Image (tube, coloured by chain):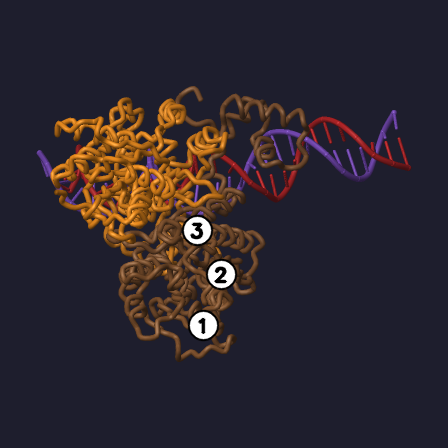
Chain colours: A brown, B orange, C purple, D red
Amino acid sequence: MISGKKPTIDDVASLAGVGRTSVSRVLNNGPNVRPQLREKVLQAVKALNFKVNQQARSLALGETKKIGIIHASDFDKEPNSYYSAGIEIGALRACSDLGYALQTHSINQNSPKVFDLISDIILNNSYAGIILTPPFCDDNNILKMAISNKFPTISISAGLKKNNLVPNIGIDEEKAGYEITLNLINKGHKKFGYIQGIEKHLSAEQRYFGFLRAIKDANLSESEMLIKRGNFTFKSGIELAQKIIESDNRPSALICANDDMAAGALFSAHKLGLKVPEDISIVGFDDTPVSEIIWPPLTTVHQPLKEFGYAAVKTLVEIIEKRVALDTCESQLIDFIIVERASAAQFG
Amino acid sequence: MISGKKPTIDDVASLAGVGRTSVSRVLNNGPNVRPQLREKVLQAVKALNFKVNQQARSLALGETKKIGIIHASDFDKEPNSYYSAGIEIGALRACSDLGYALQTHSINQNSPKVFDLISDIILNNSYAGIILTPPFCDDNNILKMAISNKFPTISISAGLKKNNLVPNIGIDEEKAGYEITLNLINKGHKKFGYIQGIEKHLSAEQRYFGFLRAIKDANLSESEMLIKRGNFTFKSGIELAQKIIESDNRPSALICANDDMAAGALFSAHKLGLKVPEDISIVGFDDTPVSEIIWPPLTTVHQPLKEFGYAAVKTLVEIIEKRVALDTCESQLIDFIIVERASAAQFG
DNA sequence: TGAAAAATTGGAACCGCTTCCAACAATATT
DNA sequence: AATATTGTTGGAAGCGGTTCCAATTTTTCA
């Protein structure tokens, strides 16, 4: 205080004329503190502008109030910013509600050291728990390592995996695929095009299975559908949509496994002189910012990313604080909604 | 070790049969350690899978290796995800290179408690330094508070403010405005439309000043230009571009203060039957993901966000470690580039 | 009113690590 | 070979908190 040093609990204690233990009690709302003493301490705290040193506190407590989140990223490519930023904002909100701090890591998913990097983060034991996002959350080696260390871990990924090793947050992707298809069927569409995502992406595959179930339920013939496999890029959307549009029996509706490909499809439709949605309805998945900023605005399935982040932290903190065992904790499905914009319409 | 407890430095010491001080020396590459002892310690470390407890370490050291970054966000609106995620990835990379951790905060910029929240973060002294992003970095009260606490702080904002209170990272926005205008002038354009951003946004205003300087340098008449003020949204781009396009003396080139408005302008041009870039060239600023995903792809000024984040951490760590005074540390301009895509072309 | 019970308070140990300093060992110097 | 110098090592005292536990006060109740 006299010098530039930060005041400690002892400074507060001596200013207030009480013992250090009492200061600690006041600070932590401990029981059995006379109002009079509490007041003295509070005044000293204010006078000195005292803030507890969290480092010291968590050392004494043997616990840390810090959650780590691990994103995938490649410094040389554009980040999948929408996804990670959305999750992070939700996670931050929950952290702030629950008194935790969030520390971010980003790991190049192509690095051969992925496993070591993540295991360092875990074993370094400076976190109370971690959140894993794709593709790390789909890596069973990583998950098993976390489990064998009994380390609170939660993943954010496509909903409903068969053998969730750790609790998972996500939407029911299969249902989302089902419902957006049903939505189009209800609009009178009978012939569909579908541009799939990359094969190993669980979520995209589940969306596709949902599509298949919906057309089956509607007694539509799967063989009539035009299925192409894309790789999530705008460019692949352009190319594959062109093929679909130019085919002999052009579908009246085109479902794309993500918004970027749908944007590409939209572009191809315009280029080939089709009107959207009059001549063809096009829908996407994810509700990324681009879906609002193209013409016509895209009908798509909204991914509640912020809710993912929030729920992930909330559940993780339950695991941490109630010491619920990792394997007894349930995964959670977050509700999604279909955002109906102008790119899909009634047919026939 | 026997139980589930994490091994401590004492466990290592006793296993290696040396003193705790020696273990610490080995761990920190201290001088004067005989190879033989070092080897014993290293073996014990490996045998126990010992990791130092960072909490304890930084308590003893009286320093923390943690940098905070404060983003603006509103939980109920879409995040400005591209911006914050890009910066964060760069910052993370630098942190990982320099041995720091990055902790994220997000604060609703409309909250009346902004000042208190940020001052808590600073006074809490659990950070070695913080990075402020817009709009917080433009708030002089916050900056002054940081300075009066001698707290290492750096801002990422529009370059070259007159009175930088703390060192700043950014591009030279005025120059960017100048150069993209010059680029169009060199393509033969003489009559311009310009859709400005929100007035209080420093960076957008500087871009506009650059535009003005360029047309002045080229002896073009400012009064011939069609200037409109937008609010950065796609919608305002649509509306204002429509007015500009429908005006009697339609410009051959339209500059928009950000990409979203440029996307809107593109849309209006299509709707009104103009071909881009044949009939009108349209350019934006920022090089957000959308600029690649619309038709035609947008010529725009790339904001090197990851470089911002990297440079911010690097400079901040210099301030922290070399104890350079905040006010002697220079701001940095990062190079930007004009990304030429298909939305702008030769005229006449 | 006095003893027993309950509520307050603070001393001291401890969380896991760094580092000053004194003790001791190894090498250099004459 | 004796001494001066330099290199190694570990004991013990913090860093700034929390908490067990014993001491002291206050309250309760016969």
Relative to residue A183, is residue B97 depicted above or below? above
Q: Tell me, yes or no, if residue B26 can be seen here.
A: no
Which amino acid, mark 3? Ile
Q: Which residue is mark 3?
A: A87
Q: Nearer the viewer, mark 1 or mark 2?
A: 1
10 Å crowding of disc 2: few (<14), some (14-19), many (20+): many
SS state under label 2: loop
SS state under label 3: helix
Q: Earlier in the sequence, mark 1 or mark 3?
A: 3
**Of the pair C16 and A84, the residue shown nearer to us:** A84
Q: Quadrant of the N terminus of chain A?
A: top left
Label 1 and label 2: CA atoms lie apart by 26 Å
Residue B338 coordinates in the image, percent (x, y): 19, 42
The chain identifier of the residue carrying mark 2 reads A
The chain identifier of the residue carrying mark 3 reads A
Q: Earlier in the sequence, mark 3 or mark 2?
A: 3
Q: Quadrant of residue B286?
A: top left
